[in-house]
Amino acid sequence: MFFLHLRNVKGHSWNHKRVYRIYCDLELNLRIKPRKRLKRGKPDALAVPEAPNMTWSFTARQAFAKQTPLGDFMADRLGDGRAFRLLNVLDGFNREGLGIEVDFSLPAERVIRSLNRIIEWRGKPGTIRVDNGPEYISGKLMEWAEKQGVSILHIQPGKPQQNAYIERYNRTVRQEWLDQFIIESIGEAQDHATQWLWTYNNDRPNMGIGGITPAMKLKMAA
């Protein structure tokens, strides 16, 4: 390629032997040692809880642009362009959606209030697996968990597979209702979320638990 470039493109009359000799003198013929690839171990399989309320998972995703990838998630806006957030809580045992909270902001106080409401009718979880968002590493959440006797398990940064159940659930939320409507208000978004959540738990077969609904699996465990 060097020879053809010098001969045909640049117009030099040098033959290929001369070009190759200079090429070697400049040590351009030395192979570049490839970087050694790091061997990465496969992540541990996500354990399936053996009973209800053993492990809950939750994460909040902020919505931004319509049908536009932002980081590792799809996003959305209200019809007037304002961004909002969703707090999704899931029981890993039967993949039951325990609650969807929608608002412009979801600080730690709001997260705690939502968890308390769920605990009132569902009971207390043993462990809550969360991501590393600022709401979830706050001292207020840790203080609440200590008082409740609930263990908070943070996933490693950049390891969403460690919270795979809620990540898969978030994708379903997005595909089945969040991306289906032009939403004009927080109230409308909350209404869509509440109606869809009932359908998800009671009418929609879930392949992750053998093609039955979360309500059916919960009933079988009773």
Image (spheres, rainbow, N blue to C red):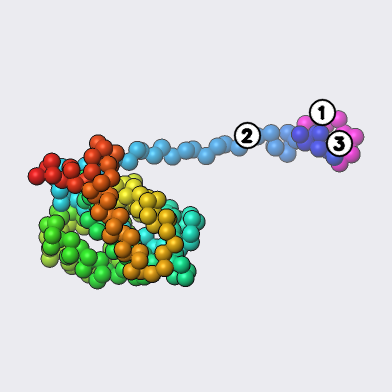
Q: Earlier in the sequence, mark 3 or mark 2?
A: 3
Compared to residue 105, the image places residue 94 above or below, namely above
> Residue 22: image x %, image y %?
78, 35
Report the residue at 13% width, 41% height from top: 220
> Residue 85: image x %, image y %?
36, 64
Report the residue at 39% width, 63% height from top: 62
For discs 3 and 1, the disc positioned in front in the rendered view? 3
Report the residue at 90% width, 34% height from top: 13
Alpha-carbon span between mark 3 and mark 2: 26 Å
Compared to residue 16, the image places residue 68 above or below, namely below
Find the residue positioned furthest to the left: 222
**SS at circle 2:** loop
Q: Quadrant of residue 47?
A: top left
Q: Quadrant of residue 142?
A: bottom left
Instruction: Let me know if residue 18 is in the magenta part.
Output: yes
Residue type beneath disc 3 = Asn
**SS at circle 1:** helix
**Taking the image as drawn, is residue 162 in sight?**
no
Res 31 label: 2
Report which residue position mark 3 lands on.
8
Report which residue position mark 1 lands on.
17
Q: Is label 3 in contact with label 1 (beta carbons under 8 Å)?
A: no
**SS at circle 3:** helix
What span is in magenta? 10-22
Report the residue at 32% width, 50% height from top: 169
Classify residue 1 as left or right of residue 54.
right
